[in-house]
Image (tube, rainbow, N blue to C red):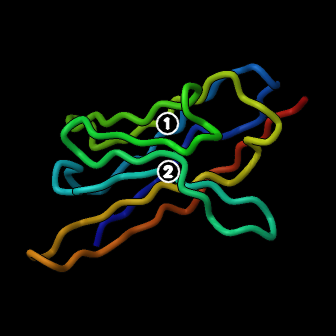
Amino acid sequence: QVKLVESGGGLVQAGGSLRLSCAASESISRLSTMAWYRQTPGNERELIAVDGGGGSTNYASSVRGRFTISRDNAKNTVYLQMNNLKSEDTAVYYCYAVLRTGSTTSTTYWGQGTQVTVSS
């Protein structure tokens, strides 16, 4: 069982920055994929940033160039640096991780979410 705990959310003005953290209960080097999703009321969770390991990252078009996902293996933490925030970035942000349990099997984990509110 992997526990993920997000932090760093809050209220920020448009154009500002926030850095979200996702602390894992075990070594993130074992987690093949880590990602950030976000969700607004009445909508499905949206994948916005993925770290597939080995330096491989990908972003949703809505955040590319403004958000950066990174890992600190020594701290077992994944970050989401969010710059030039817009009102449409307001959402609950969730950390997501995939732990490979076998050659063809894996288990996924979610954090509890952290609220980001961008005021215009």
Looking at the picture, does residue 18 appear above or below residue 30? Answer: above
Cα–Cα span, label 1 and label 2: 8 Å
x and y percentages locating residue 3 in the rendered image: 37, 63
x and y percentages locating residue 119 in the rendered image: 87, 32
Element marked by disc 1: strand
Look at 77% across and 32% down and name the residue there.
Answer: 86
Residue labelled with disc 2:
36
- Indicate the quadrant containing the N terminus: top left, top right, bottom left or bottom right: bottom left
- Report which quarter residue 88 is drawn in: top right
| Furthest-left residue in this view | 103
| Furthest-front residue in this view | 61
Q: Which amino acid does label 1 sit on?
A: Leu
| Furthest-right residue in this view | 120
Element marked by disc 2: strand
Residue labelled with disc 1:
80
Q: Foreground residue, 58 or 91?
A: 58
Q: How crowded is mark 2: few (under 14 residues within 10 Å), some or many (20 or more)?
A: many
Look at 30% across and 64% down and name the residue there.
Answer: 98
Task: Give left or right: position of 23 versus 81.
Answer: left
Task: Give left or right: position of 112 versus 58.
Answer: right
Callout 1 touching callout 2 (CB < 8 Å) = yes
- Indicate the quadrant containing the C terminus: top left, top right, bottom left or bottom right: top right
x and y percentages locating residue 12 in the rendered image: 77, 28
Q: Which amino acid does label 2 sit on?
A: Trp
Q: Foreground residue, 34 or 60?
A: 60
Mark earlier in primary sequence (1, 2): 2
